[in-house]
Amino acid sequence: MLDNPTGRLDADNELQPDACLRLEDWAGGQSRISEDDYLEGAPALIVAVAASRVSYNLHDKMQVYRRNRVQEYLVWRVLDNAFDWFVLDEGTYVQLSIAASKAQKLINSANSP
């Protein structure tokens, strides 16, 4: 468990995800915990809950995560009542429509009276 959710992806980019999954080296992970308790390198999965600045989450942040080889990126767009799930495939994010549509059903059922 990280005490500090801030991570360093590279020399120019830090992250503060709403949630992330870090794998150990032996499990294929690309990140480590630094001596000053920061996550360094790309976690396997990043989750963002976006109420605003959606274009930032789906464009700028996504490109940084892609360049740093974050394997999966999930964005819950609260105001749009939508869920986007991306998986890195040969250096490009591919949106998982089936997983996203199942997540969308969960979001819709949680928001219904």
Image (tube, rainbow, N blue to C red):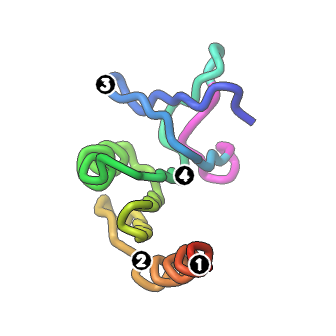
Q: Which mark is residue 44?
A: 4
Q: Is residue 18 left or right of residue 57?
A: right
99 w.r.t. 4: above or below: below
Q: Is residue 113 left or right of residue 54?
A: right
Q: Amino acid at mark 2?
A: Leu
- Quick one: label 3 or label 4, which is nearer the N terminus? 3
| Foreground of the two, 53 or 33 | 53
Q: Position of residue 54 (x, y in %)?
A: 30, 53
Q: Which residue is mark 1?
A: 106
Q: Which residue is mark 3?
A: 12
Q: Amino acid at mark 3?
A: Asp
User: From which residue to which does the magenta span run?
Assistant: 24-33
Rounded to the nearest whole Å, what is the CA distance between mark 4 and mark 2? 16 Å
Q: Secondary structure at mark 4?
A: loop
- Quick one: label 4 or label 1, which is nearer the N terminus? 4
- Quick one: label 4 or label 2, which is nearer the N terminus? 4
| Foreground of the two, 94 or 79 | 79
- Quick one: label 3 or label 1, which is nearer the N terminus? 3
Residue lying furthest right in this view?
Answer: 1
Find out whether the residues at labels 1 and 2 contact each other: C-beta distance under 8 Å: no
Q: Amino acid at mark 4?
A: Ala
Label 4 crowding class (10 Å Cα cut-off): few <14, some 14-19, many 20+?
some
